[in-house]
Image (cartoon, rainbow, N blue to C red):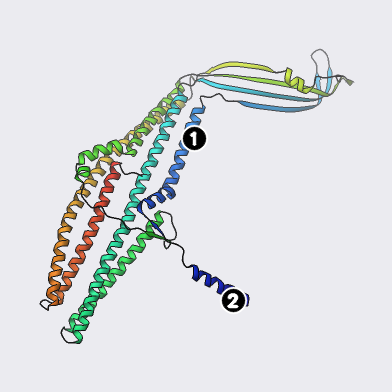
Amino acid sequence: MRRYFLFGSIFCAVSAFTGPGPVKTLTLPDCIGIALQNSTAILKGNNDVALAGTQVLAAYGQYLPNLQAAGGYNYDLGNNYYGSTGPYLAYTARSAYSYQLTSSVNIFTGYYNYSNFKAARLNRNASELTLDRAKQQIELDITQSYLQVVLDRKLVDVDSNNLVTSLQREQQLQALTDIGRRARTDLYQQQAQTSQDQLLLINAQSRLKNDKILLLQKLRIDSSESYAIEDMAIDDGAEAGKYGSVGDLVQEGLRSRVDLKSAELNVQASDWNIRKFRSGYLPVVSAGGGLYNNGASFNALHINGVDETPGSQTSQLTQLYKNTYGLLGVSATWNIFDRYATKSNVAAARIFADNARIDKEDTRIAVVANIKMAHNDYVNAVQQMETVGKGLVAAQEAFDAVNARYQQGATDFITESNAQQVLLQAEQNKIEASVNMLLQKRAIDFFTGTIAP
């Protein structure tokens, strides 16, 4: 027991001495990099690209000759009756060996191999573009979550300053009430206001913690205590030269959106699949050849009861060497009637190609619509910035004026409290509008396909 107690004391002392582990601060590029490395969508996307690559390799391999090797051993034992020239009863015990080495190559497959290879390459390229789009989606998602944490922190700062203002006024009112210069109702009202401001701060801090946990969850990081989110400067300036013209943005999106390019590749791959299955109407020509050999030796040979086992036999290795023969040939096959298999495959491939064209057109329409909506949101964000900027200036001036009059006793507590709440709301609106302005620019970059993963 003393040893256990001593060990526990030492462990607690070491833990207290070492303290918590170091906290790593994450920037927005850090978070995006971690997400691109750990995201489930990216991991699966990499697997899809690798799978498409193996399909390209398999399609290319159809142009190459194959090579097969085979070997065998047989041991025959028993009686056999022969009656061609006379009745013979032969008892044999024989060991037989054989091997063969064969190869064949496709000379003409009705363009099946060529079409299959082209379609496989297009599918691989489409998979790579799909992976790029997934990376762009992750960057936008992580940026949104990161900016939400930054917004929460700024709102916590604003609510903290507001609570400090309320606490200071409450202390002043407490002192003025004690000497009889202020009515006690003002103190009670201020205490209620202070409690409300404190509740506002508690809720803001809780949102900050939850949004930070949500961000780390998207990064697939478990421990939120070991990481801190770095603050960042908010670029809330309007950029009319880059985001002002919706027509230019639409054209940029039609040029740059990788998912639209991927849809086009899917259409091309579908067309090549039609050609691939139409090859079933054409003959297939192939060439092949091989080396063959066999050898045998009698362990026993009795004919009509007489031992006829040869006194000497060619060795098995010599037989396997000398008995080798080769074979070369060209074959052609043509399915005159294949029970409508080719016709059905071609019809299905045409349907898939038509669906691919429909998907491409839907993607194009979505690109245009998303860019127009994102531009509308950007214009709205610009207008919000102008409005909240003026509102914040007016709210600050109004609060300063009302607060000065309140300090002199020229106005009541209700007017003072209302001016403080209006200023608080104006500060919150300004912060939210600034973050929203940056986010809308990132959204336009995403919908035009220019956001860099």
Residue 446, above or below 415: above
Residue 394, given in percent of the width and then of the height, sits at: 13, 63
Give whichever of discs 1 and 2 has the lower sequence position. 2
- Residue at the spot x=40%, y=49% of the render? 33
**Separation of disc 1 and disc 2 at Cα?**
61 Å
Instruction: Look at discs 1 and 2 and give the one toward the viewer.
Output: 2
Which residue is painted at 20% across and 43% down in the image? 241
Question: From the image, which quarter does the C terminus lie in?
Answer: top left
Relative image position of residue 429 (x, y in whole percent): 21, 60
Nearest the viewer among 321 and 369 is 321
Residue 344 shows up from this direction: no
Q: Residue furthest front?
A: 17
Looking at numbered disc 1 in the image, what kind of residue is underneath it?
Answer: Thr
Is residue 24 rendered to the left or right of residue 204? right
* Residue underneath mark 2: 5
Comparing 159 with 111, the one in front is 159
Quick one: 231 or 331, which is closer to the camera?
231
Per the image, the residue denoted by label 1 is: 54
Assign a secondary structure to mark 1: helix
Which element carries disc 2, helix, strand or loop?
helix
**Given the current orientation, which residue lies at the most extreme top position?**
85
Question: Which amino acid, by three-letter code, is at mark 2?
Answer: Phe
Q: Looking at the rendered structure, which numbered label has been put on residue 252?
A: none
Residue 99 coordinates in the image, percent (x, y): 69, 24
- Which residue is painted at 23% across and 72% down in the image? 165
Count of numbered tags = 2
Residue extending furthest left?
Answer: 410
